[in-house]
Amino acid sequence: MTLSSKRAEYVALASLILSVLFFGIAFFVGRWSGFSPVSAVSWLILSAALIWLVLVIQFHQRALAEQEKLDMSQLAKDQDAPTIFQAKGERAAMFTVAQRRLEILEKWFIPIFSAAIAVYQIAVGLHLLNALLAPTDQQTKQPLICAICMTAIAFVSFLISRYATGMSVQLQWKPLRAGGSIFLAIAILCFTLAVSLALAQFKILAVVNVIGFLIPILLLVLGLETALNIVLDIYRPRLKDQYSRTAFDSRLLGIINEPGGIFRTLASTIDYQFGFKVSQTWFYKLLEKAIAPLVLFAAVTLYLLSCIVVVAPNEQAIIEHFGNPMKDADSVRIVGSGLALKRPWPIDIAYKYPTKKIMEISIGFVPKLDPRTGEPEPGPLLWGEAHHEQEHLLLVASEQAGEKLTAGAVPVSLLIAAVPVQYRIKDLYSFIYNHSEPEKLLESICYRELTRFAASAKVEVDNSTDMDKSLLGAGRAEAKHTLTENIQAAADNAGLGVEIVFLGLQGIHPPPEVAPDYQKVVGAVQKKQAAILNAHAKRNRDLTTLAGSVAAVDRLYALATEYQAAKKQNNSQKIRELGNELDLAFTQSKGDIFKILRQAQSYAFEKATLAQATGRRFDDQLKAYTAAKEVYKREQRLVVLEEALENIRKYVIVGDPNHYQIFEIDLQEKLTPSLYDLTGYEETNEK
């Protein structure tokens, strides 16, 4: 019996009309009521309308092809028909116009339309997600009317889904499965949305919000699956006379649409992709028969896995047997890192805690958290700015009293104490069972000990000698040690079973309102200390420049003082000894003293040497004068002339004393040569 595609075409056309109608109802009802999930489901219905539109076109073309085939067969049986209608091969294919259009439609148009559907689903899914994540203050109304509309859509969609899915059992009507699957998903979503809208009548909006996120996620998943199917269809082996499943026919929705044939769907998917009958193999048939025992075995295995406890390297686990953690009177069921066995739940229950992890509590402040990571934001600790989300004031005693205290004022001060306390669990049983809320108890102990300690600590000091005892200065190191010991002792007395690892006092500072006044005092003290240090530095620099080192200057000063005291006492022997030591000390000194002494010695040596040389030269000159007076005098005269006329032009004229000659010498210099003196400028024909 040959099934006609007309019936499938009518079903697809009716479903298309209902899809458009459901889209309009859901869209306008969602806009009117303000419930965004109702509007979102309308876009899912519109994607179903696109699928039904493709199915209408496909089945309409199939019906035309079937009618054409029927006409061709009738003409072939007619004895009076022309022989052209009895042609075979390529000539016969020329007259099957509808069949060729169907092949082109299924080969090119349906994949292109599948890609368009995938793009639509992904784009709409992303748009709906962005709209949900954006802040909005839209008011909602009439959830019951919306629930009634969603129920009607769900009921009709379910009927059409079951009818179309039943028809898709036949090979000729297989494409109807795509529309039946998407309508079943719409029916389930609309029914769930109707229930959530009914709960919204009682101000229970959690389910509605969850469905609001579920619809765009479903659209994204369907769009990505369709796109993946298009890519896989390119590499899929195609067999003749075998049904090719369209890309927009969701395999995921097909599993829900045919719950009794999950394995058949899986097998057909593998058959579709790899081109051989997996469902006919012995392994598939064995798996189909043994599915119930396998599910039961999996459930029992999962239950027995509760007998295994996996403890991380930084954790310890305590095991309760019917609520009792004690193994006997003196021992506790504590398991270290690694694998451990216990009785199945709920006989034995294991509780794991990070005993080696360093945990932190914030005392005196609420830290600022990074919205992206949820971790505290690090930042500079400045007195004039707020460091954290909230900072608590700490009342401390003040040392100022009497005349310094303003009339009517109380001798107390206010400080902001941001103290992070880090701890770890050292006794797991005491931490869990001695107190119901050990973290809050430890926080209370830290606040108590901090307040008690601050009441007896020094905050402001009047002189620099007590700066190392100030809670705002160098006294923090000692305060940190003392406060850590006090908190640890109080925690041990309370039986908390924790160890204080670190306590930070870097966050103690005055309130930002009075921070400038504190900073002025600190600035004045620092300027004073800077002036003192600069004076010491200048003293050291000057003394080092003078004698090479401060110790050498101190030694010279001590010897000079003793020498002056000996002179006053008129002790000649001591004066002589100290004088020698002082001379030796000056001789061994460096710096400017060494430089001046060496310059004096050099000057004395130079004067003595020059005087000795001058005397020797005079003796030699006297001997030369005595030996030849005229020669010596002329030699000295020439020496004088040589030294005096060193930079003067000289002319030497030699003449016979017996002859009288007159020489005229023009000693003027010609700055510019005469016109008659120019030579070397003659014309020439050489080139």
Image (tube, rainbow, N blue to C red):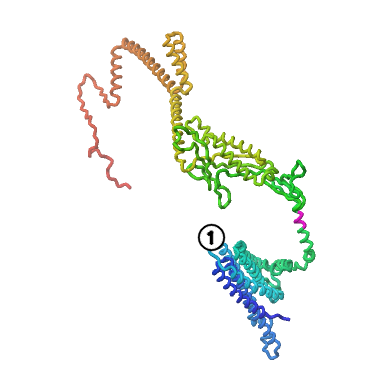
Residue at (53% x, 64% y) in the render: 138
Instruction: Please tell me which residue lies in front, 70 or 406.
Output: 406
Report the predominant secondary structure element of the magenta stretch: helix
- Image-based side of 414 in relation to 496, left or right: left
Start-end of magenta stretch? 300-304
* Residue 393 point in image, percent of width and height: 52, 43
**In the rendered image, which quarter is residue 14 located in?**
bottom right
Q: Residue at x 26, y 25 (%)?
A: 651
When the figure is inspected, residue 77 is found, relative to residue 145, above or below; the finding is below
On the image, the x and y values in percent for residue 396 come to 52, 38
Q: How many marks?
A: 1
* Amino acid on which disc 1 is placed: Pro
Residue 487, located in which quarter of the rendered image? Answer: top right
* Rendered location of residue 286, percent (x, y): 79, 64
On screen, residue 635 above or below 350: above
Near-viewer residue (451 or 13) = 451
Q: Magenta segment: does it hold 302?
A: yes
Left or right: 272 in relation to 643: right
Q: Quadrant of the N terminus?
A: bottom right
Name the residue carrying label 1: 135
Instruction: Using the rendered image of the protein, determine whether residue 647 is visible from the camera's viewpoint.
Output: yes
In reply to whether residue 123 is colored magenta, the answer given is: no
SS category of the residue bearing label 1 = loop
